[in-house]
Amino acid sequence: MEPSLPAESYLRTRMKFGIKLGLERIKRMLALAGNPQDAFQSVLIAGTNGKGSVAHLMARILFEAGHRVGLYTSPHLVSYRERMRINGCAIDMDSFNSLLSWAREIAERIERDEGLDPPTEFELLTLMACQHFANNGVEFAIMEVGLGGRFDATNALTPVLSIVTTVSLDHTDRLGSTHFDIATEKLGITRPGVPLVTGERKPAILDYIQRHCIAHGISMRVVGIDVRWQKRWARYDGVCADYVTWCAEYPELECALGGDFQFANVGCALGAVEILRECGIAVSTDAIYRGVARARCVGRLDVLQQKPVVVADGAHNPAAATSLSRALRTLFT
């Protein structure tokens, strides 16, 4: 069952307010809720492409390691409930509707009593996800940034680890017209002293990220340098490579997400998990293998049927379209 029609309708009315970047509304709502985000450790994932795959990979690895894991992603394919999961299970309809009624009261309160602009759909959903995770004893929340980073609602949380997957041109009307502008927005999710993993490969942008990290006392790990791989095979239903990080080796690491572009996404997730392990978080090597092998992410080179081949993919910007085109030519011709 899906969220009730009144709930769905209310969220859609919030879409009319569009995307209003800024943290004042979400921070105020979280404060009125008692700051539920403080009940768990969070990982923020920004990036033009790949952040959804990295989020699902990380969540599955931590789940396989025995941790209770929240996963917050966007957008959804069928139901709003897909956006907030615990240990792989989407929030149930009753809990969703109850949380929405609760969040609606908080939203109306800050509008009425404090004169703030109406919270957006994404801000309400972020508030609901934080409360859902707190209510259910989540240890870690893997939070996918909605847009940009610096002023995204997820950035109201204080992460123990930040990830910037890639930096490409997208949403240039809001984030800026150059790669450096967009990198600046995405680096807004970093914090002094909090580690960063990036999958960015363009030398000029990588240098820009490195200078940001040095200036703010951030330790940085780079996929392709600190996490490397030797490809074994790539198919539409998965990839396999020998991975080497700065502290371990993972021969024949198989991932069920298809396409060559997933090698770097696995590298991002692997680098992030290595940092968590260095911080004392229990994640066994077996859990890493199981998590990478069992992670699923619908709408990413998703083969719906074989004869004829029908593929669904959420590519929606030039860089993603290029990666998809390359994968289709390689795997299906």
Image (cartoon, grey):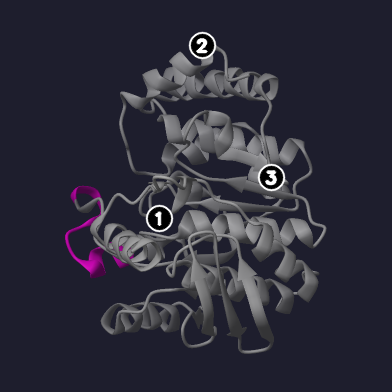
Q: Nearer the viewer, residue 117 or 310?
A: 310
Q: Nearer the viewer, residue 266 or 92?
A: 266
Q: Label 1, on which residue?
A: 149
Q: Amino acid at mark 1?
A: Gly
Label 3 packing within 10 angstroms: few (<14), some (14-19), many (20+): some
Which residue occupies 44% across, 54% down? Answer: 301
For residue 311: magenta?
no
Sequence order check, earlier mark of 3 and 1: 3
Magenta part of the chain = 173-184
Residue at figure coordinates x 77%, y 50% from the top left: 68
Q: For the residue carrying disc 1, how many other residues have a C-alpha within 10 Å: few (<14), some (14-19), or many (20+)?
A: many
Residue under label 2, please give it.
5
Query: Quick one: label 2 or label 3, which is nearer the N terminus?
Result: 2
- For the point 51% across and 20% down, the residue is 109
Looking at the rendering, which quadrant does residue 148 occupy?
A: bottom left
Q: Position of residue 54 (x, y in %)?
A: 53, 61
> CA gap, disc 3 to disc 1?
24 Å
Query: Which residue occupies 60% across, 52% down?
Result: 296
The secondary structure making up most of the magenta span is helix
Q: Which mark is residue 88?
A: 3
Q: Nearer the viewer, residue 243 or 185?
A: 243
Residue, far top: 6
* Cα–Cα span, label 1 and label 2: 31 Å
- Say which amino acid is labelled 2: Leu
Could you tell whether 208 is left or right of 242 in the image?
A: left
Vertical comparison of 331 with 39: above or below: below
| Percent x, y of residue 35 | 64, 41
